[in-house]
Amino acid sequence: MTLNKKLRVAVLASGGGTNLQSIIDQSQEGILDAEICLVLSNNQDAGALKRAQQAGIETLCIDHRDFKTREQFDQTVVAALKKAGTELVVLAGFMRIISEIFLQAFPQKIINIHPALLPAFPGLHVQQKAIEYGAKFSGCTVHFVDAGVDTGPIIAQAIVPIFNDDNEEILAARILEQEHKIYPQAIQWIAEKRVKIEGRCVHIEDSKNVTAAFINPPIR
Ligand code: GAR
């Protein structure tokens, strides 16, 4: 479905920005009906800022170390997002906790991607934690942001196997490949207004059911 009006999306990123790149690419290919109105980072060296500049997208760096409190930082971020006309805030490797001020400014309009199958392994270094736990699968989760850490209603998940000889880097790369698929898709569902939140549960209108189940290691 191609929409007449594109969703104005601001992407917040602290790091390399491969998720941002997948959103830029899919927007340019016309698969994603989103216009990135701003890429904002708390880290002036973030690769995400360079990727945005290369794509001709407006960028802004607000360094959290310049603020006394999280709330003061968030107030400044919110003002910049509002000024850019943001309709959806997309956290893509944004390594800051979101305060109540930020949440109230964009109710149910902030989404995040997390490199694990929530509710397993919230927080940081989660690929390493999944390996050390001995999990046979991990994956990634797109979710709405609420007041907790990685606790908001889940929009979509993708799973990947964990192999015996995996290390953190290899598993992170396997998960990232799936992040680049499900994050732009989740944004597109929101742009199409197909995402309904009921309590903790999110339903995507007119989505198909998956039919496959996965076993790792495989039987026989
Ligand atoms: C991604 O793996 C994302 O899931 C993770 O940071 C990486 C950013 O990569 N986010 C978190 O861990 C949030 N708690 P990118 O900069 O290449 O998109």
Image (cartoon, rainbow, N blue to C red):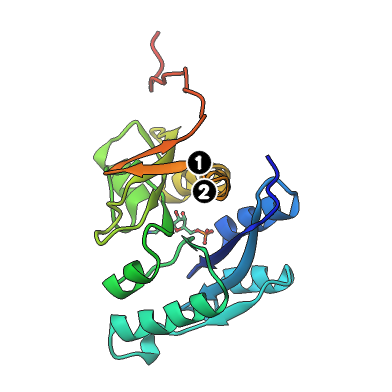
Label 2, residues with CA under 10 Å away: few <14, some 14-19, many ≥20: some
Q: Residue 167 carries which label?
A: none
Q: Position of residue 130 (x, y in %)?
A: 31, 43
Q: Where is residue 54 in the image (x, y as percent from the top left)?
A: 73, 71
Q: Residue at x 30, y 51 (%)?
A: 152
SS at mark 1 in the image:
loop
Question: What is the three-letter code of the residue carrying label 2?
Answer: Ile
- Relative to residue 102, is residue 90 drawn left or right? right
Where 83 falls versus 33 (above or below)?
below
Tell whether circle 2 marks a residue whose Cβ is less than 8 angstroms from ligand 1.
no
Q: In which quarter of the image is the N terminus?
A: top right
Q: Can residue 97 be seen in this view?
A: no
Q: Quadrant of the C terminus?
A: top left
SS at mark 2 in the image:
helix
Q: Residue at x 62, y 53 (%)?
A: 22
- Residue bearing mark 2: 190
Where 92 falls versus 26 (above or below)?
below
Q: Residue at x 56, y 56 (%)?
A: 19
Quadrant position of residue 146: bottom left
Q: Where is residue 31 in the image (x, y as percent from the top left)?
A: 69, 45
- Residue bearing mark 1: 194
- Relative to residue 33, is residue 113 drawn left or right? left
Q: Where is residue 74 in the image (x, y as percent from the top left)?
A: 37, 79
Question: What is the three-letter code of the residue carrying label 1?
Answer: Arg
- Relative to residue 85, is residue 104 drawn left or right? left
Q: Distance between the residues labelled 2 and 1?
A: 6 Å
Pointer 2 and pointer 1: residues touching (CB < 8 Å)?
yes
| Residue nearer the viewer, 16 or 192 | 192
